[in-house]
Amino acid sequence: MATTKITKEQWAESDGYLARLREENANFASAYGRPRYAHTETYGCQQNVNDTERIRGMLKRAGFEFTDDAEKADLVIYNTCAVRENAEQRVFGRLGILKHIKEQRPGMLVAVCGCMVQQEHITEKIKKVHDHVDLIFGTHALWRMPELLYRAIHENGVVVDITDSDGAIAEDVPILRDKDEKAWVSVMYGCNNFCTYCIVPYVRGRERSREPEDIMAEIRCLVKSGTTEISLLGQNVNSYGKDLGLDIDFADLLRMVNDIEGVRRIRFMTSHPKDLSDKLIYTIRDCDKVCKQLHLPLQSGSNKILKQMNRHYTREQYLEKIEKIKREIPGITLTTDIIVGFPTETTEDFYETLDILKAVRYDSIFSFIYSRRVGTPAAKLDFVLKDEEIHRNFDEMLEVQNQICKEKNLEYEGRVETVLVDGVSKTDKNLMTGRTDGGKIVNFRGTPDMQGKYIDILITHAKQWSLEGEIAK
Ligand code: SAH
Ligand code: SF4
Ligand code: F3S
């Protein structure tokens, strides 16, 4: 299916609602002597973070101001994730707490959006159990939020829009980003892979790529406002462009971004191993601004499990790619995602995964205990292992990986690394924090004016999860 865009007229209609809201918010401010406050909370992946930036862009245009405190907000929006049960439970927990807050502040408006509510059974549950929710909209309705919000303010009862669409792309939605120096830029939406454990294709729809000119225009605009690090986003960036009917793939896109003056670092995620081409490996190697870092989700090291997960590669093929990557790009930082406790996984299968961790020696891993997702094929499978066995395997994996992380970090001691400074460290207010080209966190003694700058740091001490250093002479 060819990718379609929301027309200018369609967006103009949405924007018209933002104008109405802006007028109402101005009246509110003169009546109450304060602006209307919005509070947003984001769960899940960077795609959701990027969506929240759009939500905030629209809210700002509608005249809302923002507060970090949900209790002070006139509008609370939860942008939710459905990938694992605990992400959903947290949102239900938050909604429970909000119920009491809303009882004290009846004018408050509560909205739930994103992946979780794109599932009908969840939306039904929210409507039944949390009748203080005023607005529910799914991932496909994001650009229609202005109208939905307007209706939620003016109508009684809950406004719901979780219509499924194979997804047009809305280019004109304004974006309000948190950081100046770094930006996430979505290059495609949706996923066609249907890994058997995963809900994402059901809640995000089919793959659709943004047109290269639109992506380039967004990045040029970011660079003008001071952004130097660009992270390109998609559930599987390696299939970028397939739906566009143009002769451009993700590697070509990387080169195009690499050519933009003012961009200093380019990152991207996520790459599906089955689609990782040699061309992409050479492009990462050859493009000076593309960070030497690759996130390549393995999920499992057992061929039996990989097949049942519908991953379309074997452990041998995966390892072959890793070998090639390491050969072509020595020193590249490698990270991965692992699922422990897929229903049919035995402890032997698990040990095959552990073997790969030991062989590849990832810089870090994101590991998850399998969570059953309603409507996915794997949800019908019976479990081989007991809960406690799965948890024991999970803990064993963390132990093995922690050791590897520490050893890999030790290799950095004595090196000078260029760090893009993020700001003040969250754990120690006296330290500044930033990331290396490979994405490692470095804390060092510096000053807040260094935020957004690239600074050479001599690494003096390796910790489990981060590096410590001092400004290089
Ligand atoms: N498109 C990306 C990321 C998808 S979600 C990719 O394919 O890599 C991020 C991670 O969540 C996945 O890589 C997987 O490891 C994990 N995940 C997805 N569904 C899950 C489930 N049902 N239970 C546990 N982990 C899951
Ligand atoms: Fe989920 Fe697989 Fe798509 Fe990743 S590639 S989003 S794991 S279905
Ligand atoms: Fe979660 Fe949706 Fe991302 S399900 S992981 S927020 S695409």
Image: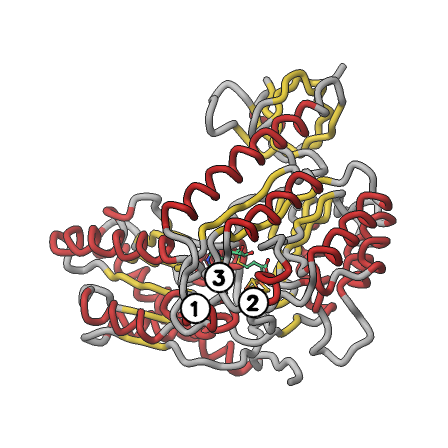
Task: Indicate which disc, 1 or 2, sits on the residue closer to the N terminus.
Answer: 2
Task: Indicate which disc, 1 or 3, sits on the residue closer to the N terminus.
Answer: 3
Contact, mark 3 vs mark 2 (Cβ under 8 Å): yes
Residue ranking furthest to the bottom: 1
Picture disc at residue 242: none
- Front-most of residues 271 and 181: 271
Residue ranking furthest to the left: 104
- Front-most of residues 307 and 415: 307
Q: Is residue 59 visible?
A: no
Q: Dot 1, crowdedness within 10 Å: few (<14), some or many (≥20)?
A: few
State how far apart marks 3 and 2 are (Cα): 8 Å
Measuring from the top left, give residue 271's x and y in whole percent. Answer: 67, 58
All told, the count of numbered labels is: 3
Measuring from the top left, give residue 156's x and y in whole percent. Answer: 18, 75
Q: Residue at x 22, y 71 (%)?
A: 127
Residue under numbered circle 2: 308
Question: For the residue with label 3, is its CB less than 8 Å from the closest atom of ligand 1?
Answer: no
Measuring from the top left, give residue 371's x and y in whole percent. Answer: 41, 58
- Front-most of residues 427 and 149: 427
Quadrant of ligand 2: it is: bottom right
Residue under numbered circle 3: 344
Q: Amino acid at mark 2?
A: Gln
State how far apart marks 1 and 3 are (Cα): 7 Å
Q: Is residue 426 visible?
A: yes
Question: Is 393 drawn above or below residue 18 in the view shown?
Answer: above
Question: Is 90 drawn above or below residue 61 in the view shown?
Answer: above
